[in-house]
Image: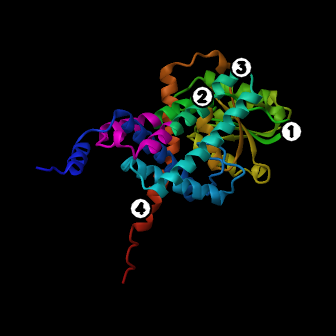
Amino acid sequence: MKTDAAPLKALSLASRNAPGWMAACRGAALGLAFLAILNLLEPFVYSNDLVRNWLTDLRPLTPQLSLAAFTMFATSLLLFSMRPALPAPVMLVLLSLLVVFIAFCGRDLWLVSQHMQEPARTTALMAPLTKVMWLIVVGTGVVTGNSERTRGHSSGIAIFLCAVLSVFGYCIATVQSGRLADTLPDSAVPVILALNSTVSPEQTSGLSISAVDKQATALMLSKHGQLLVISGKSGDESERSLLSRLILPGLNAAATQIAIDTDSTTFDASLRYADRLPQLQQDRRIIIVVGNELELAQIRVLASRCRLVAIVVPVESAAENPKSGMLVLTEAVQLLKAMLTPAIEFAKKTANSNTPSPLPAE
């Protein structure tokens, strides 16, 4: 009796599991799609363009082209993570976008390797190398998604875990690679901002060592700026008097002014305060002093949302302090929270817009 071999073969292929590396590729694509979606929310929440995004610098592309590229990129990545065997048009679009992003990340690699010296070059290469490897893993899965050997059911748990590890690994690499201080400009900038360097409410005997370090670094950089802003938690008049006695003797009053922001409790609030200063309305350059070099990546993300041209530097004593693995993980979590902020703000705006207004009283 003649058997129908083709349907039996198709049935056997459908019942088997796909290779484990295909789940890793789909998980990497899901994580990359998540990051692309967060980037897409930036223009809607903060009115930023996507030319300079978290993945790479897309110049000379225009903001419109960058937005179109990210929209198609996120959509096709989501489709691949749900169904690896993509239709030919979608597969070609995704492969083309992967090549584009690999090319721009490769440009970042080349610029770092050509213009930086060891050991800073090794540190700076961590983030672009991670991005290139991430894109190559996704591209491998896209190319082989239609193969007979990769067909089958992938574990949903494995895909989700790979996506989480991909996003968190990206955050760790960004924190580690971003801990290099920016080069100070040749000309004076309008504002120097010392983040969260006032007396905290828990302290009663004066400034903390971290606050003193930030203020000392800001004083040394005062010749590069016209206004020095000391930002931190709220305090009273005695705190303001203490800060003035510590800082004013080290300033050249004819060249540098001082302002104390005692109302900002977070980095984001301090940067928004600086954004409203009249000195930054024309020239958007600002030098930001932070207490830990691992915070530099987070501060750059927050400053870009205020459209500030940030030159971020850690305190002078930061290089002498050993950076534990737990501190790196903590800063990676803080960076992830900063990246999730546009999604949270977008959800709040959507919920508020959908809330029905109260009926007028009759």
> Which of the marked residues, 1 or 2, is nearer the chain's N terminus?
2
Q: Amino acid at mark 3?
A: Glu
* Residue 298 left/right relative to 289: left
**Of tags 4 and 2, which is closer to the observer?**
2
119 on left or right of 282 = left
The residue depicted at 74 percent of the width and 22 percent of the height is 117
Against 350, residue 126 (above or below) is above
Of badges 3 and 1, nearer the viewer stands 3
Residue 118's disc number = 3
Residue sitting at 50 percent across and 45 percent down? 35
Q: Tell me the CA gap for discs 4 and 1.
A: 46 Å
Nearer to us of marks 4 and 3 is: 3
Q: Amino acid at mark 1?
A: Ser
First in sequence: mark 4 or mark 1? 1
The first of marks 4 and 3 along the sequence is 3
Which residue bears the numbered disc 4? 351
Of helix, strand and loop, which mostly describes the magenta segment? Answer: helix
The residue type indicated by label 4 comes to Ala
Label 2: element kind: helix
Is residue 342 shown to the viewer in this render? no
Give the quadrant of residue 249. Answer: top right
**View extreme (right): residue:** 254
Q: Residue furthest bottom?
A: 362
Sooner in the amino-acid sequence: mark 4 or mark 2: 2
Of tags 1 and 2, the one toward the viewer is 2
The tag earlier along the polypeptide, 3 or 1, is: 3
Foreground residue, 44 or 115?
115
Secondary structure of residue under mark 3: loop
Residue corresponding to mark 2: 126
